Amino acid sequence: MELYARVNILDGKAVRLPRGALDQVIYLDADPVARALGWVAQGADRLHIVDLDAAINDDYRNRPLIREIIAEVAIPVQVGGGVRSNLEVDRLLDAGAWRVVMGTVAITDQVLFWEICRSHPGRIAVSLDIAADQELVTQGWQHGSGRYLEETLIELASAGAASFLLSEVGRDALEEPPNFEALQTAISLVDEEVIVAGGARDLDDVRALLKIKSGDHGVAGLIVGREVTSGRFTVEDAQALLKGAAKDLGPWSLEQLEDEVAGYLQVLTDGGDPDAEMTVEHIERFVRWLGGGTP
């Protein structure tokens, strides 16, 4: 799983939208270029830029600023907001974008979406906002589409989408968990990358995301922002967890080992061990316990 850092741009400034609503917008101290460079310095794998002026008002004044960000950073950048034509896709790719993110148009004009995907194979991501019942919501969370996640994923994957960004309508990323059920559905249905776009409350949520699997297929990315700046966890903490999960541990996954260690320590605690911690002796006993021995 790769870690994406979010940069929302409104009126030429970096902003935060706690629940995705403009009436709750918070203007951040850092300008967008500085904010992007800060994410890179912290260790983000990729940037996710959203041009809110273009998305909401068809105002493309931020595009030169986005071009500047892409030129300044040394990691791949995907850009969304106001992408409604082949021409706009071309402009963003010419500016150096790694991928271009489409939203409402991918759902409402699938003929155009097919055409764009054919013209730009592997470069088009789709942002899908879902309600609790997995209905897709469009136009900045203002309208229900009457379309649902499963059918839309299959159709857009067939059209040539390179990845899917899933977020939940009205969710507060600091208080509410990701929709794990919807993510499991998506992972099970399509081979294309599925990216968690709504963030995670804490590292326990990140661990839970790592456990979502369909065969050897899992969540490909996590977009973070507010949870890091609010101090829930650091990019370094998240990267340590993600990179650790990617290590080859032979027949054991990291999650399985963590579960087994927790179970082993519980056995020691229930048995009255006053020092139930992973000392060298305990580790040796733990290995024997894994093999079916007694602790």
Image: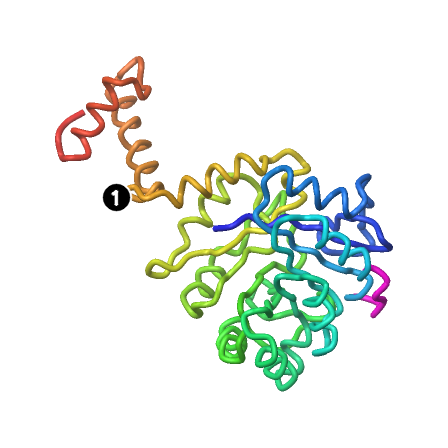
Which residues, given as a range, are shown in magenta?
Answer: 56-62
Question: Is residue 15 left or right of 188 when viewed as pictured?
Answer: right
Q: In percent of the image, x 18 and y 24: which residue is there?
A: 295
The furthest residue to the bottom? 111
The image shows residue 128 at horizontal and vertical percentages of: 61, 66
Q: Position of residue 254 (x, y in %)?
A: 35, 41
Pointer 1 residue: 250
Mark 1 residue element: loop
Residue depicted at x 49% and y 44%? 206
Query: Majority secondary structure of the magenta segment?
Result: loop
Quadrant assignment, res 202: top right
Residue 180 versus residue 141 in the image, above or below: above
**Residue 16, placed above or below residue 183:** above
Say if 151 sits above or below 289 in the image.
below
User: Is residue 44 visible from the viewing direction of this image?
Assistant: yes
Residue 57 part of the magenta-drawn span: yes
Which residue shows up at 54% across the image and 66% down it? 163
